[in-house]
Image: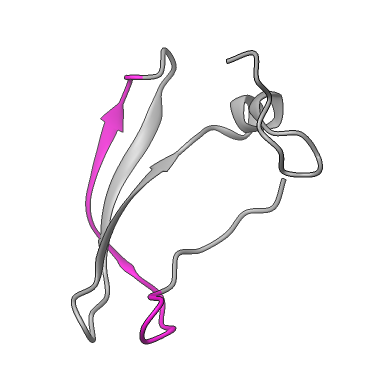
Amino acid sequence: MRMSCAHCPKCKIKLQAKESRIHNKFGFSTVKRRRSCPKCDFRITTVEVPMEIANEVFLKDANWVTTI
């Protein structure tokens, strides 16, 4: 699995993390981040999953595993 960085779909610049908090809704610890574009104020929320969990959830061809 490849690590990626969030970019604004309008401006194509890197989004800045404005707020980060621990998120346990899925039964394991994740990080939920509120990100925004410093130029146009586009906002998005991301949930970052630990790499060990991500490798179990996603197949190599990026399809969802249906046993979740």
Name the quadrant of the N terminus: top right
Can you say whether 46 is above or below 9 in the image?
Answer: above
Determine the residue positioned at 36% across, 83% down.
Answer: 10
Q: Position of residue 44 (x, y in %)?
A: 29, 58
Q: Position of residue 25 (x, y in %)?
A: 32, 19
Q: Is residue 40 above or below residue 30?
A: below
Q: Residue at x 30, y 28 (%)?
A: 23
Quadrant in the picture for the C terminus: top right
User: Is 41 drawn above or below residue 23 in the view shown?
Assistant: below
In the image as oriented, which residue stretches furthest toward the right? Answer: 60
Residue 10 belongs to magenta span? yes
Percent position of residue 29, x then y: 40, 22
Residue 55 placement, left or right of 36? right
- Above or below, comparing residue 19 to residue 5 in the picture: above
Residue 29 colored in magenta in the image: no
Pick the front one: 51 or 12: 12
Query: Image point 41% across, 76% down: which residue?
Result: 9
Range of magenta residues? 8-25
Q: Which residue, as the protein is rendered here, is positioned at the far front? A: 66
| Scheme by which the image is coloured | one colour
The picture places residue 8, in percent across and down from the top left corner, at 38, 75
Rendering quarter of residue 57: top right
